[in-house]
Image: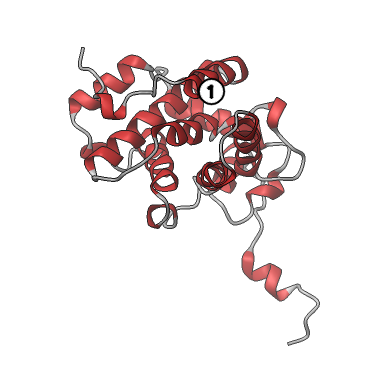
Amino acid sequence: MPHIPEAAAIPDTKLAKAITEFIRDTETDLLFNHSSRVYHFGALAGVRGGLKFDRELLYAGAMFHDIGLMPSHSSKHERFEVDGAHAARDFLRSHGIPEADAYTVWTAIALHTTPGVPQHMHPVVALVTAGVEMDVLGLTYDQYSEAERTAVVGAFPRTPEFKEDIIQAFYDGIRHKPETTFGNVKADVIADKEPHFHRGNFCSVIRCSHWHG
């Protein structure tokens, strides 16, 4: 079995262990394994790209990025990405992480479903999205070697029907607040599961405002 290189391994630190324990106790196995793969794929992308990044902060961003899908961390009216960002920031603050670093992780999670922006930002922000885009969308599949893919999936397996399982997990986590999907990719999830769903329309909002001109 191929091994994950040390530069992309999970940090052997007190904070990383606390994150692992918290997420394992809070999320489903599906989301825990997915988030772990997101970390490794993000870290591998960072190593390949020669980026300097803090592995602890990247691990925090990757592991917390979907916690907003869980009922215990889901608000009534915020986007699930923001719920996850808040949870990560609060956790890091409680462990004495500087506010600037906690905000970097907050940003990474809040923007991980906003394509075209994160790659131009702080490496931690960029790499959380890179990991998500690899594990969920497979956009950069060919940029990873077979050995790298085998090592990551061997450590944190994908379910046999992961594509459908993750779409269902997204839906289960946001179905109670479809209005939060306005202008973002999760509107596609609601539309996939609810054929009669009418998503918000940016042009309609403009035209229906109180402005006369």
Measured from the top left, where is residue 165 in percent x and y? 50, 25
Measured from the top left, where is residue 122 in percent x and y? 42, 51
Left or right: 149 as drawn, with respect to 69: left
The structure residue drawn at horizontal position 36% and vertical position 41%, both measured from the top left corner, is: 53
Which image quarter holds the N terminus? top left
Residue sitting farthest toward the bottom: 213
Looking at the picture, does residue 152 appear above or below residue 137?
above
User: What kind of element bears circle 1?
Assistant: helix
Residue type highlighted by circle 1: Ile
Looking at the picture, does residue 114 appear above or below residue 80?
below
Which image quarter holds the C terminus? bottom right
Q: Nearer the viewer, residue 126 or 104?
A: 104
The structure residue drawn at horizontal position 77% and vertical position 81%, both measured from the top left corner, is: 211
Q: Which residue is mark 1?
A: 19
Q: Nearer the viewer, residue 201 or 135?
A: 135
Left or right: 39 as drawn, with respect to 88: left
Measured from the top left, where is residue 119 in percent x and y? 38, 53
Dividing the picture into quadrants, the one containing residue 84 is top right
Left or right: 128 as drawn, with respect to 24: left
Dividing the picture into quadrants, the one containing residue 204 is bottom right
Residue sitting farthest toward the top: 1
Mark 1, other Cα within 10 Å: few <14 / some 14–19 / many ≥20? many
Left or right: 45 as drawn, with respect to 60: left
Q: Nearer the viewer, residue 99 or 124?
A: 99
Looking at the picture, does residue 121 appear above or below residue 87?
below
The structure residue drawn at horizontal position 60% and vertical position 15%, both measured from the top left corner, is: 25
The structure residue drawn at horizontal position 26% and vertical position 20%, both measured from the top left corner, is: 151
Measured from the top left, where is residue 67 in percent x and y? 60, 30
